[in-house]
Image: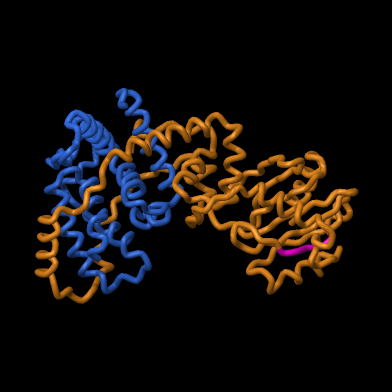
Chain colours: A orange, B blue
């Protein structure tokens, strides 16, 4: 494989994720995070335009089914070949594997892509999160388990969720844990951890990651609430609050630094 | 196995870029699949069959792995009755251009693109069928699409 054959390496390591989104390979949380990134990235916008152009071209090529005569000849050949001999597959396959040489671009992307599952569903996740946060602020709705002790909150989720969310207390840093509750997002139950900072409430929504690990911290503001997304420990995290952006960022840094 | 015959036929056709060679590969691959089906333990028979087609094609002497343009022959399908002949001609020319552009792609880009766009395999299935890591599948897809889009632009394709 000659170097000349390689296309230039894209200048933003998110372009393969733009493509993955187009191919329906990102889950809703990842797609929302990517969208937030793409809004401010000219390279990713250009990449999307190019991908759409290619797709539009390919749509012109009609799908060709097997012609009847070919199908008949295959069937005839298969009837001849029966009955199959006892399988001894291992030896005979050795020769058929050609070496394909080292392709692989964007180490940053390729390395991060270990597991992929298709989750084509989309939704306006940030809006759902803010709605969940506002709903929870109504009197009596904030916590299902009220405790400032992470060792009380964490076991409370056992049996209520099919995953174990990490629970941490940052009282020493001015963000005491207040409790936790269950919420429902994107068709699945998620953990919501409740923190307080001065007079403000911070909700942290947690659920397992299911698609491409997307290492992207993204920020949005919606209806006066700040929303921050990050991933780690195999989980999606979304923090929603009316605290100031800088304070919410400090809080997220604490979370990400914690073991 | 036969539910996936169309997929096998198309992959063979795009790999070999020649109908006769494609049929040879298809026949050989189907016989192998039948022979080894008893030992198939996976969960995805389509990806498994496509993997056999691909191996058979790569083992075939007539697979041209070069960069040269060898367009697969035009088919002689006639335009549907009632078609405006001018529009039909234009469309067939556009089709031929796209087909030639795909056929001109390096084989590893071409197979990845065809499996994704025409067979609608997921990245995971393509990785299985082509025995390639998912990251490589993604970068090949990216390059294939980029080449197509840029070639079309250079040629001023509508």
Name the one closer to the observer, B120 or A155: B120
x and y percentages locating residue A149 in the rendered image:
85, 65
Residue in view at x 21 percent, y 76 percent: A86
Q: Is residue A123 visible?
A: yes
Q: Which residue is drawn at 69% across and 51% down?
A: A129
Quarter residue B103 falls in = top left
Q: What's the residue at 30%, 42% (across, down)?
A: B110
Q: Is residue A37 above or below residue A156?
A: above
Image quarter where the C terminus of chain A lies is bottom right
Q: Where is residue A15 in the image (x, y as percent from the top left)?
A: 50, 38
Quadrant assignment, res A156: bottom right
* Residue B95 falls in image quadrant: top left
From the viewer's perspective, is A232 left or right of A181? Answer: left
Position in image of residue B54 (x %, y %): 26, 53
For the point 11% across and 48% down, the residue is: B20
Magenta span main SS: strand
Q: Is residue A114 left or right of residue B111?
A: right
Work out whether A69 lies above or below A144: above
Q: What stretch is highlighted in magenta?
A: A178-182
Residue B68 visible? The answer is no
In the rendered image, residue A33 lying in the magenta stretch gets the answer: no
Residue A186, placed above or below residue A84? above
Q: Residue furthest front?
A: B82
- The reply, left or right, for residue B145 in relation to residue A244 is left
Q: Which quadrant is home to the N terminus of chain A?
A: top left
Residue closer to the observer: B125 or A23: A23
């Amino acid at each position: 494989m000659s170097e000349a054959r390689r296309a230039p390496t894209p200048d933003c390591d998110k372009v393969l994720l733009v493509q993955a989104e187009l191919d329906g390979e990102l889950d809703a949380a990842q797609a929302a995070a990517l969208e937030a990134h793409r809004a401010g990235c000219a390279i990713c916008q250009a990449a999307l335009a190019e991908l759409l152009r290619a797709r539009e071209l390919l749509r012109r090529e009609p799908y060709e089914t097997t012609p009847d005569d070919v199908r008949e000849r295959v069937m005839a050949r298969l009837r001849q070949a029966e009955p199959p001999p006892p399988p001894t597959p291992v030896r005979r396959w050795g020769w058929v594997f050609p070496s394909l040489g080292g392709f692989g671009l964007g180490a940053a992307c390729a390395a991060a892509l270990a597991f992929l599952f298709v989750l084509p569903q989309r939704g306006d996740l940030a809006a759902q999160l803010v709605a969940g946060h506002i709903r929870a602020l109504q009197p009596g709705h904030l916590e299902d388990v009220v405790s400032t002790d992470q060792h009380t909150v964490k076991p409370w989720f056992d049996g209520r969720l099919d995953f174990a969310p990490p629970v941490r207390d940052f009282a020493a840093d001015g963000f005491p844990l207040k409790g936790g509750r269950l919420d429902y997002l994107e068709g699945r139950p998620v953990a919501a951890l409740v923190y307080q900072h001065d007079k403000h409430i911070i909700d942290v929504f947690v659920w397992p990651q299911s698609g491409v690990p997307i290492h992207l911290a993204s920020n949005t503001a919606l209806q006066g609430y700040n929303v921050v997304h990050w991933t780690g420990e195999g989980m999606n995290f979304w923090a929603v609050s009316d605290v100031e952006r800088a304070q919410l960022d400090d809080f997220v840094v604490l979370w990400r630094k914690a073991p | 196995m036969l539910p996936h015959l169309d997929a096998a036929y198309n992959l063979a056709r795009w790999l070999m870029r020649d109908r006769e060679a494609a049929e040879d590969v298809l026949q050989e691959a189907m016989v192998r699949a039948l022979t080894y089906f008893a030992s198939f333990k996976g969960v995805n028979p389509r990806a498994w069959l496509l993997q056999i087609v691909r191996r058979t094609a790569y083992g075939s002497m007539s697979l041209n792995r070069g960069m040269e343009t060898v367009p697969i022959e035009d088919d002689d399908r006639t335009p549907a009755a009632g078609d405006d002949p001018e529009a039909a001609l234009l469309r067939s020319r556009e089709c031929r251009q796209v087909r030639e552009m795909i056929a001109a792609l390096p084989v590893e880009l071409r197979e990845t693109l065809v499996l994704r766009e025409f067979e609608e395999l997921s990245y995971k299935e393509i990785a299985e069928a082509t025995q390639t890591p998912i990251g490589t599948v993604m970068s090949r897809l990216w390059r294939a699409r980029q080449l197509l889009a840029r070639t079309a632009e250079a040629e001023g394709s509508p």
